Amino acid sequence: MNALHSPKLLPAADYARDVAKKIAKARYRVAMIATTFRANDERSQAIVDELVRAAERGVDVCICADTFTYIEPKEFILRAPKRQPARAMQALKLERRIKKAGGSFHWLGRKANTLFAGRTHSKWTVVDDTAYVGGGVNMDDESFSNVDYMFRFSDQALADRLIQEQQHIYRADRGGGAARNHSAPVSKTTTILFDNGLPTNSLIYKRARALAKQAEHIALVSQYCPTGALNRTLKRKQAVLYFNHWRTASSLNKLLIRLGMMTARQKTLYNHDCYLHAKFLIATMPDGSKAAITGSHNFMYGSGLVGTREVALETYDPHLIRQLETFRRRYVE
């Protein structure tokens, strides 16, 4: 990958501004996949407004969002609108607005048999030949305020790959099933990894553990405490862990973090007030070289166990890894 196309790490708030400007100039396509998709502050509203304008001028706009985030899947197909929770009603209005402008909007996970199986936790945005991926930012006010980031790539091949993957996920989801996990090269030093909903089989988690097993030192940043075989590997290594303490989280997240800390017997070095939502692992090898996994996966065994859709980058690119290290020093330590 040459210098012109080197990825740039954008903190969450910068990503929101940048993607809105890109969509405003979009010529032929915009695709977005996220767990949450709401217009509940100026930043998210600006993005939605630009999506609508893009669709109205003939740009192919396609949005995919996760059903579970709003309400239980069985409730989401209720026919009586008055019985829908307010949060879901707002989401449905947003869906209608984008469709009215000429765009497409798809809910993922409606045919899932349980609340978590079939959940989509992947996040990316494609605007023409620009791809935003490799971070954990969703589309709402909370996401843009968290400690988080996305990488911006000026790369047609990567943009094309993400468009194809989004179509693949939508087709598989319509059939109520998962798809095969797989990977694809982004450059000579970076590979994109896709978990596509196969229970008990997370490619991203396996690659994170493989790197950790080879490493001499590991730095892990996540929303949650790492669990499972990866955690057991971390306990045998020189590892520093940064994740939210359960006391600073809310509702379901508090429970997940507390259970994770109890079972993993790990402590966190993260002590800032702002909620940590970034997810990456940097492995320093015995020869001093470094590798990283960065994306939507929280490095919990349970994510792969239930078959959550995820996306991540595995990279040996020094420029990309330095940006992760700078982010860690500035926002996490």
Image (spheres, rainbow, N blue to C red):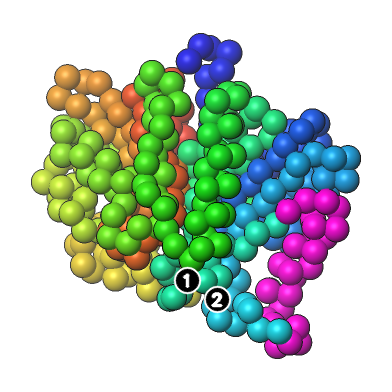
Q: Position of residue 331 (x, y in %)?
A: 48, 41
Quarter of the image holding residue 117? bottom left
Circle 1 residue? 112
Q: Position of residue 5 (x, y in %)?
A: 56, 18
- Residue 237 numbered tag: none
Quarter of the image holding residue 69? bottom right
Distance from disc 2 to disc 1, alpha carbons, whole Å, reads: 7 Å
- Magenta stretch contains residue 103: yes
Left or right: where 165 falls relative to 328: right
Seen at 56% across and 40% down, the residue is: 164
Q: Position of residue 250 (x, y in %)?
A: 48, 71
Q: Is residue 299 visible?
A: yes
The amino acid pointed to by label 2 is: Pro
The amino acid pointed to by label 1 is: Ala
Structural crowding at the residue carrying mark 2, measured as other residues with C-alpha within 10 Å and reported as few (<14), some (14–19) or many (≥20): many
- Residue 73 numbered tag: 2
Q: Specify which label sits upstream in the sequence, 2 or 1.
A: 2
* Label 2 with label 1: CB-CB less than 8 Å: yes
Magenta region:
80-104
